[in-house]
Amino acid sequence: MRYDTHLPANMILHPQRGRVLKLLVRLRPIAFIAVLLVLWQIAIDLHPIHILPSPWQTLGGIAYLIHHKLLLKYIVASLFRVTWGFALAVVLAVPLGLTIGWYRRAEMAFNPIIQLLRPISPLAWIPIAILWFGVGDLAAIFLIFLGCFFPLLLTAINAVQNVPAVYINAGRNFGLTPTQIVRRVLYPAVVPQLIVGLRITLGIAWLVVVAAEMIAVDSGLGFLIVDARNAGNRYDLVVAGMAIIGIIGLALDLAIRSLEHVKSFRWGYAEE
Amino acid sequence: MPYTMSFTEDATPTMTATKLSVDHVNMTFTRDGKTTPVLEDINLEVREGEFICLLGPSGCGKSTLLNTMAGFLQPTSGAIRIDGEPVTGPDARRIFVFQERGVFPWLTVEGNIGFGLAKLPRDERARRITHYIKMVGLEGFEQSYPNELSGGMKQRLEVARALAVNPDMLFLDEPFGALDSITRLVMRGELLRIWEAERKTIIFVTHDIDEAVQLADRVVVLNSRPASIQQIVEIDIPHPRNLSDPRYLELRDGIFQQIGLAHKV
């Protein structure tokens, strides 16, 4: 084309060039992390004092954990506790919250005790957890359960109260029985808000498991961090553990966020 | 024109049965120990297949009256009967179309229209869904969710959902209030077309005088707080109505004056 020759080269957008640009945009966050890692490595190389292991040493730490067959074992141990604590909280808090939210009187009765227990950090329960369940999985699961239970309960209560009366009335108008109203109106109406609650709560569960493992058990990623420090100041393993915790936390969040893209849930989220 | 013929037939009071009767209905709300009268001695007879508009200013209690007719609220005293039976609660034979747009956002267009049809066999259900999607002009949007539709389309969807269960009455609470004026005009035409085709008894609440005179067989003009019936105006103009017809303007201005007098402006 004739015009092309008059245009500055950077203004001509070939389809292929467009695709490359898109890829570059996608890669930007990863590139940024890479830059940070390089800067970190350089900083450690320039000032080799022991305040932090370098990325390279951290990678070595991860390799050490893999070699000693500890990495998978600890990840599985942590995920096992999170799964149980989180699942128990979901199974109990969601139906209870939906019920309390539905009956205004129940909410008035339960609200003060919920508000009183909610600000107590799950970590404050550690001595009680050990007293009741001993040092072991049960104590950790109990702490995760506590950390998840109250936020989920409140989410479920609010979700029900936010359901517009018009949906319930429409359900009644079409001759639905109370059970059908719960199944066909109430439940689909609260799901989007519940998913947000689940997402926040799963994040809390992942925070609490690490703390719980530092005190109440002798396996898992939290235990790894404390143990690596206590048994010989292996800070490469400490930071390796931290990195693994971050990566798994991100993966969990991405997994639960994928629920928000389900078509019949998507109406519940602001879209622009 | 066949429409005009059937209209004049139905408009003759002696020829059709009473569908709904409102008999000395009073309603008071009690809040913080204070009782507020909302409805005052409402008496009304609605014939089978009639299109009634309840007209009154915002907050006058016309929605409350509609809700008692539909069975969502119980009157403090008096009785509401449909087909001679007292109304005790909402019923699938009489569908309420909500002003806040009560379509379910978690269901597709098909899912919404089929909502009240769960008991039907699969193929009958599919047949009705297709029929009503076509009637309200939502072909091609069967799998769309309500948040992908415009306001007017959502309103049509809700009307289709109501019609799909084949009710004998429709209650419409300012259904076109949130639409822009052009869409509103189109929707009025659509509603009349559906009404001509299906001959449901329709009770339509509005605060728009033009809307009432364009649509209704009779306009029930309500006083404000507590709502009581000020006048019932028979709109004796056949459909389709010419909006510059002298009779149309006369009836409209008459109601304007009525409402104006009620407020002593």
Image: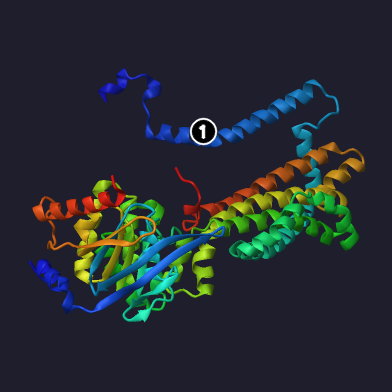
The residue under the point 55% across, 35% down is A27
Vertical side of A45 occupied by B51: above or below: below
Please tell me whether residue A172 is drawn above or below residue A50 in the rendered image: below
**Secondary element at tag 1:** helix
User: How many numbered callouts?
Assistant: 1
Q: Residue at x 43, y 70 (%)?
A: B75
Is residue B167 something one can see in this rendering? no
Q: Position of residue B242 (x, y in %)?
A: 11, 54
> Hey, which residue is sitting farthest right in the picture?
A231
Q: How far across and down, in percent of the image, does residue B261 sit?
A: 26, 50
For mark 1, name the chain.
A
Left or right, B175 with reference to B247: right
Which amino acid is tagged 1? Answer: Leu
Quick one: B121 or A248, which is closer to the camera?
B121
Instruction: Name the image colouring.
Output: rainbow
Residue at the limit of the structure toward the front, as seen here: B264
Q: Residue furthest left?
A: B1
Residue B170: in sight, yes or no?
yes
A180 relative to A207 in the view: left or right:
left
Front-lying residue, B120 or B1: B1
| Residue shown at the point (34%, 67%) measured from the top left | B42
State the residue in front, A142 or A84. Answer: A142
Task: Indicate the position of residue A71 as horizontal and vertical percent values.
Answer: 78, 50
* A100 relative to B245 in the view: left or right: right
Which quarter of the figure is the C terminus of chain B placed in?
top left
Residue that numbered label 1 is attached to: A24
Residue B89 in picture, x, y percent from top left: 43, 74
